[in-house]
Image (cartoon, helix red, strand yellow):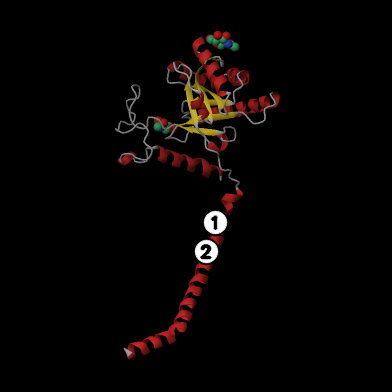
Amino acid sequence: MKNRHSGSRIGVKTDPQKIQKISDHICLWFLLLVSIAFISFVLTKLITAPLRNKSFEPCKPRIVGIFHIASSRDATFDQISKLTHIVFNHLRYQRNGTIRFVNEEEKETFKRMNKLSKKTKVKTLFELEIGDYSDYIKADIPGLMKHRNRQLILVDSIVSFITDHSLDGVYLHWEPPHTTTVQLFVTTLFKDMRDELTKATKQTNRKEPFIITTTIQRKNITLDFDEVLKYVDFLNLETDRIYGSEPHRSSWNEAIGPPTPIYSGHYKNSEDNMNGAARKYSCWTVIGRM
Ligand SMILES: *[C@@H]1O[C@H](CO)[C@@H](O)[C@H](O)[C@H]1NC(C)=O
Ligand SMILES: *[C@@H]1O[C@H](CO)[C@@H](O)[C@H](O)[C@H]1NC(C)=O
């Protein structure tokens, strides 16, 4: 008993030293951690400085919906309100550069849906497919390239369509321009369109620029993004039908899976999913612009 007591007394005597030691340790560790934090902070700032100087503006999320004006069912006010952009699809491009509705019914549906959209904050665009799968139209990209007159008519038709119907812009759906000549041509046409739309912005006293967007294929870098993104506001990456074939494309990826997987894929196609495509394109476009 006594020993134990004296032991505890000894213990009590040595406590202040122990506490001193512990607090010294804590102090040291604290200082070390603070220095590490400081060094990491400085390093991070140094490393990311070149990125920050490029004034990257974080882009607002977009929810783009495509409405097919041949549809027998209208979109509702609630559905449209949830979008940031609505694209009206099914206008026809004609060889001489003009555009038209397929029929009166589609024209009426378009007008009705456009009117309803105007009651929401959604941005309204129309889609124009040039170089459709049908051979008739596909054949016309070379035709359009040869005739400057048709190009001017096309640009003019697009601008008039936008201003006549008080739309916010156009979605140009090109078939993939595989050759460099076609790529240059498509880029030139984007430039022409931007120039004319900028004029129209002033003429109509519009506060914000009109929108131009376009399709890009998920597999190939088909355009010079540095140049294209000077005129185009955003790109619409095609990620539908990653798996599954279409009747006229027997060599299409025939692996079985969901048509548009978000992350999954098969061994050699393991990057064939939305995540892979988005990563690839964000690299191509961002690195190109840095
Ligand atoms: C363009 O072609 C369509 C159909 O062929 C025709 O109806 C229209 O009048 C033509 N427009 C011009 C400006 O040539
Ligand atoms: C990619 O481009 C090449 C030619 O530039 C073409 O032959 C090939 O079909 C394209 N691939 C896809 C998936 O479009």
Question: Quick one: label 2, few (<14), some, or many (20+) residues within 10 Å?
Answer: few
Using the image, determine if residue 163 lies above or below residue 219. above
**Residue 192's spot in the image, x, y percent?**
61, 26
On screen, residue 16 versus residue 207, left or right, reads: left
Q: Foreground mark, 2 or 1?
A: 2
Q: Which mark is residue 47?
A: 1
- Which quadrant of the figure shows ligand 1? top right
Question: Quarter of the image holding residue 220?
Answer: top left
Q: Secondary structure at mark 1?
A: helix
Asked whether the residues under the numbered discs 2 and 1 touch, taking CB atoms below 8 Å apart as contact, a structural biologist would say no
On screen, residue 20 versus residue 227, left or right, reads: left
| Quadrant showing the N terminus | bottom left
Q: How many marks?
A: 2
Residue at image location 53% in from the left, 67% down from the top: 34
* N-terminal label among 2 and 1: 2
In the rendered structure, which amino acid carries the disc numbered 2?
Ala
